[in-house]
Image (cartoon, helix red, strand yellow):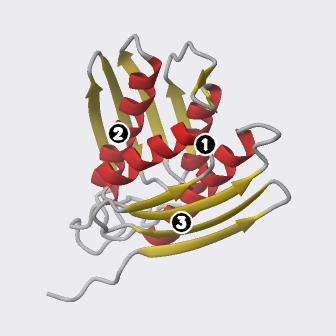
Amino acid sequence: MPLLSPRVASVQRTTRETDITLDLTLDGSGKDTIATGIGFFDHLLVALTLHSRIDLSLTCRGDLEVDDHHTVEDCSIALGTAIDRALGDRAGITRFGYAYAPLDEALARAVVDCSGRPYSRVDLGLSRERLGTLSCENVSHALASLAIAARLTLHVDVLAGENDHHRAEATFKAVALALRAAVARGAGSDVPSTKGILA
Protein backbone atom coordinates (compact mmCIF):
# COMPACT_ATOMS: atom_id res chain seq x y z
CA MET A 1 0.00 0.00 0.00
CA PRO A 2 1.50 3.39 -0.98
CA LEU A 3 2.41 5.83 1.79
CA LEU A 4 -0.11 8.65 1.99
CA SER A 5 1.32 12.14 2.07
CA PRO A 6 0.67 14.05 5.29
CA ARG A 7 -2.12 16.60 5.09
CA VAL A 8 -0.68 19.59 6.91
CA ALA A 9 -0.84 23.36 6.58
CA SER A 10 0.51 26.48 8.24
CA VAL A 11 -1.05 29.93 8.15
CA GLN A 12 0.39 33.24 9.25
CA ARG A 13 -2.23 36.00 9.18
CA THR A 14 -1.21 39.47 10.29
CA THR A 15 -3.41 42.53 10.01
CA ARG A 16 -3.75 45.75 11.98
CA GLU A 17 -6.38 43.91 14.04
CA THR A 18 -4.86 40.47 14.65
CA ASP A 19 -1.60 38.53 14.50
CA ILE A 20 -2.22 34.79 14.06
CA THR A 21 0.11 31.81 13.79
CA LEU A 22 -1.51 28.46 13.02
CA ASP A 23 -0.21 24.95 12.32
CA LEU A 24 -2.61 22.13 11.45
CA THR A 25 -2.35 18.40 10.87
CA LEU A 26 -5.56 17.05 9.38
CA ASP A 27 -4.79 13.41 10.23
CA GLY A 28 -3.85 13.93 13.84
CA SER A 29 -5.01 12.75 17.23
CA GLY A 30 -6.77 15.84 18.55
CA LYS A 31 -3.78 17.55 20.18
CA ASP A 32 -4.13 21.27 20.71
CA THR A 33 -2.23 24.36 21.75
CA ILE A 34 -4.79 27.14 21.50
CA ALA A 35 -4.58 30.69 22.85
CA THR A 36 -6.84 33.31 21.28
CA GLY A 37 -7.31 35.50 24.34
CA ILE A 38 -11.02 34.58 24.49
CA GLY A 39 -11.54 31.78 26.99
CA PHE A 40 -14.83 30.40 25.74
CA PHE A 41 -13.70 30.54 22.12
CA ASP A 42 -10.62 28.52 23.12
CA HIS A 43 -12.99 26.06 24.82
CA LEU A 44 -14.99 25.62 21.59
CA LEU A 45 -11.86 25.21 19.46
CA VAL A 46 -10.48 22.60 21.86
CA ALA A 47 -13.73 20.63 21.44
CA LEU A 48 -13.51 21.01 17.66
CA THR A 49 -9.90 19.84 17.64
CA LEU A 50 -10.39 16.89 19.97
CA HIS A 51 -13.46 15.42 18.27
CA SER A 52 -12.29 16.03 14.69
CA ARG A 53 -8.90 14.46 15.55
CA ILE A 54 -7.19 17.45 13.95
CA ASP A 55 -3.96 18.58 15.59
CA LEU A 56 -4.04 22.35 15.96
CA SER A 57 -1.62 24.94 17.23
CA LEU A 58 -3.19 28.40 17.18
CA THR A 59 -2.05 31.61 18.81
CA CYS A 60 -3.60 35.00 18.29
CA ARG A 61 -2.88 38.48 19.53
CA GLY A 62 -6.00 40.47 18.72
CA ASP A 63 -7.46 43.88 19.41
CA LEU A 64 -9.64 42.63 22.27
CA GLU A 65 -9.69 46.17 23.64
CA VAL A 66 -12.08 46.85 20.73
CA ASP A 67 -14.14 43.66 21.09
CA ASP A 68 -13.98 39.97 20.25
CA HIS A 69 -15.17 40.14 16.63
CA HIS A 70 -11.85 40.54 14.79
CA THR A 71 -10.15 37.79 16.79
CA VAL A 72 -12.97 35.28 16.26
CA GLU A 73 -13.37 36.09 12.59
CA ASP A 74 -9.66 36.06 11.73
CA CYS A 75 -8.92 32.88 13.71
CA SER A 76 -11.82 31.16 11.92
CA ILE A 77 -10.58 32.37 8.54
CA ALA A 78 -7.07 31.12 9.33
CA LEU A 79 -8.40 27.74 10.47
CA GLY A 80 -10.58 27.39 7.38
CA THR A 81 -7.70 28.38 5.12
CA ALA A 82 -5.48 25.74 6.74
CA ILE A 83 -8.15 23.04 6.27
CA ASP A 84 -8.55 24.03 2.62
CA ARG A 85 -4.79 23.90 2.02
CA ALA A 86 -4.42 20.57 3.83
CA LEU A 87 -7.19 19.04 1.70
CA GLY A 88 -5.38 19.94 -1.53
CA ASP A 89 -7.40 18.83 -4.57
CA ARG A 90 -9.66 16.80 -2.23
CA ALA A 91 -9.05 13.57 -4.13
CA GLY A 92 -9.80 10.41 -2.18
CA ILE A 93 -11.83 12.03 0.59
CA THR A 94 -15.26 10.88 1.70
CA ARG A 95 -16.52 14.43 1.00
CA PHE A 96 -19.78 14.27 2.99
CA GLY A 97 -20.19 13.99 6.73
CA TYR A 98 -22.98 14.44 9.22
CA ALA A 99 -23.26 14.08 12.96
CA TYR A 100 -25.43 14.66 15.98
CA ALA A 101 -23.84 15.60 19.29
CA PRO A 102 -25.65 15.87 22.61
CA LEU A 103 -24.51 17.73 25.69
CA ASP A 104 -26.93 17.02 28.49
CA GLU A 105 -30.24 18.60 27.40
CA ALA A 106 -28.77 20.13 24.22
CA LEU A 107 -28.65 18.36 20.86
CA ALA A 108 -26.86 19.75 17.81
CA ARG A 109 -26.78 18.54 14.21
CA ALA A 110 -24.10 19.33 11.62
CA VAL A 111 -23.84 18.38 7.96
CA VAL A 112 -20.64 19.03 5.96
CA ASP A 113 -19.92 18.81 2.25
CA CYS A 114 -16.30 19.44 1.24
CA SER A 115 -17.77 20.74 -1.99
CA GLY A 116 -15.30 23.49 -2.78
CA ARG A 117 -18.28 25.83 -2.74
CA PRO A 118 -18.50 27.95 0.42
CA TYR A 119 -21.92 28.17 1.99
CA SER A 120 -23.23 28.08 5.54
CA ARG A 121 -26.57 27.98 7.27
CA VAL A 122 -26.17 28.19 11.02
CA ASP A 123 -29.13 28.32 13.41
CA LEU A 124 -28.09 27.96 17.05
CA GLY A 125 -30.90 29.80 18.82
CA LEU A 126 -28.62 31.31 21.47
CA SER A 127 -30.36 33.74 23.78
CA ARG A 128 -27.59 35.13 25.97
CA GLU A 129 -25.52 38.11 24.90
CA ARG A 130 -22.22 36.51 25.89
CA LEU A 131 -20.61 33.27 26.97
CA GLY A 132 -17.71 34.45 29.08
CA THR A 133 -16.13 37.15 26.93
CA LEU A 134 -17.35 35.61 23.65
CA SER A 135 -20.32 37.35 22.05
CA CYS A 136 -22.98 34.79 21.20
CA GLU A 137 -23.41 36.29 17.74
CA ASN A 138 -19.77 35.40 17.08
CA VAL A 139 -20.35 31.68 17.73
CA SER A 140 -22.38 31.50 14.53
CA HIS A 141 -20.02 33.92 12.78
CA ALA A 142 -17.04 31.69 13.60
CA LEU A 143 -18.67 28.73 11.84
CA ALA A 144 -19.71 30.81 8.83
CA SER A 145 -16.19 32.25 8.47
CA LEU A 146 -14.68 28.77 8.80
CA ALA A 147 -16.97 27.38 6.09
CA ILE A 148 -16.17 30.19 3.67
CA ALA A 149 -12.39 29.96 4.12
CA ALA A 150 -12.37 26.13 4.02
CA ARG A 151 -14.66 26.12 0.96
CA LEU A 152 -17.21 23.90 2.69
CA THR A 153 -20.97 23.70 2.61
CA LEU A 154 -22.03 23.66 6.25
CA HIS A 155 -25.49 23.28 7.73
CA VAL A 156 -25.78 23.45 11.52
CA ASP A 157 -28.73 23.65 13.84
CA VAL A 158 -29.50 23.02 17.48
CA LEU A 159 -32.50 20.76 17.88
CA ALA A 160 -32.90 21.03 21.65
CA GLY A 161 -31.38 22.73 24.65
CA GLU A 162 -31.97 25.37 27.30
CA ASN A 163 -28.40 26.19 28.32
CA ASP A 164 -26.48 28.32 25.81
CA HIS A 165 -23.11 26.94 26.94
CA HIS A 166 -24.38 23.45 26.17
CA ARG A 167 -25.93 24.53 22.86
CA ALA A 168 -22.71 26.15 21.64
CA GLU A 169 -20.43 23.34 22.78
CA ALA A 170 -22.68 20.63 21.35
CA THR A 171 -22.61 22.53 18.05
CA PHE A 172 -18.81 22.56 17.82
CA LYS A 173 -18.69 18.87 18.75
CA ALA A 174 -21.20 18.03 16.02
CA VAL A 175 -19.25 20.07 13.47
CA ALA A 176 -16.06 18.30 14.53
CA LEU A 177 -17.57 14.84 14.07
CA ALA A 178 -19.10 15.73 10.71
CA LEU A 179 -15.84 17.27 9.51
CA ARG A 180 -13.88 14.23 10.65
CA ALA A 181 -16.13 12.00 8.55
CA ALA A 182 -16.07 14.29 5.51
CA VAL A 183 -12.28 14.68 5.27
CA ALA A 184 -11.56 11.00 5.93
CA ARG A 185 -9.51 9.21 3.32
CA GLY A 186 -10.58 5.93 1.80
CA ALA A 187 -12.76 6.84 -1.17
CA GLY A 188 -10.17 5.80 -3.74
CA SER A 189 -7.94 8.29 -5.50
CA ASP A 190 -10.54 10.14 -7.55
CA VAL A 191 -12.12 13.47 -6.73
CA PRO A 192 -15.59 12.55 -5.41
CA SER A 193 -17.62 14.68 -7.81
CA THR A 194 -19.45 14.10 -11.07
CA LYS A 195 -17.73 17.30 -12.25
CA GLY A 196 -14.32 15.76 -11.64
CA ILE A 197 -13.36 18.74 -9.50
CA LEU A 198 -14.40 20.15 -6.12
CA ALA A 199 -14.23 23.88 -6.70
Q: How far across and down, in percent of the image, does residue 31 sit?
A: 35, 62
- Regarding mark 2 in the picture, which secondary structure is present there? helix
From the viewer's perspective, is residue 34 above or below residue 174?
A: below
Q: Quadrant of residue 60?
A: bottom right
In-front residue for pair 136/109: 136
The crowding category of the residue bearing disc 1, from other C-alpha atoms within 10 Å (few below 14, some 14 to 19, many at least 20), is: some
Who's the residue at 74% across and 45% down the image?
70
Q: Residue at x 39, y 75 (%)?
A: 7
* Position in image of residue 116 (x %, y %): 51, 57
Look at the image and tell me in which quarter the N terminus lies. bottom left
Question: Which residue in the structure is indicated by mark 3?
Answer: 82
Q: Is residue 89 among what the camera can see?
A: no
From what the image shows, is residue 198 above or below residue 167?
A: below
User: Residue 38 — which label?
Assistant: 1
| CA distance separating discs 3 and 1 | 21 Å
**Of marks 2 and 3, the one in the foreground:** 2
Q: CA distance from mark 2 to mark 3?
A: 19 Å
N-terminal-most mark, 2 or 3: 3
Q: Nearer the viewer, residue 19 or 83?
A: 19
Amino acid on which the number 3 mark rests in the picture: Ala
The local secondary structure at tag 3 comes to: helix
Residue 118, given in percent of the width and then of the height, sits at 57, 48
Q: Which residue is mark 2?
A: 173
Q: Amino acid type of disc 1? A: Ile
Amino acid at pointer 2 = Lys
Tell me the residue at 53%/17% (across/down).
Answer: 126
Mark 3 neighbour class, 10 Å CA radius: few under 14, some 14 to 19, many 20 or more: many
**Which mark is first along the chain, 2 or 1?**
1
Question: Which quarter of the rendered picture does the C terminus lie within?
Answer: bottom right
Give neighbour class at mark 2: few <14, some 14-19, many 20+ (Cα, 10 Å): many
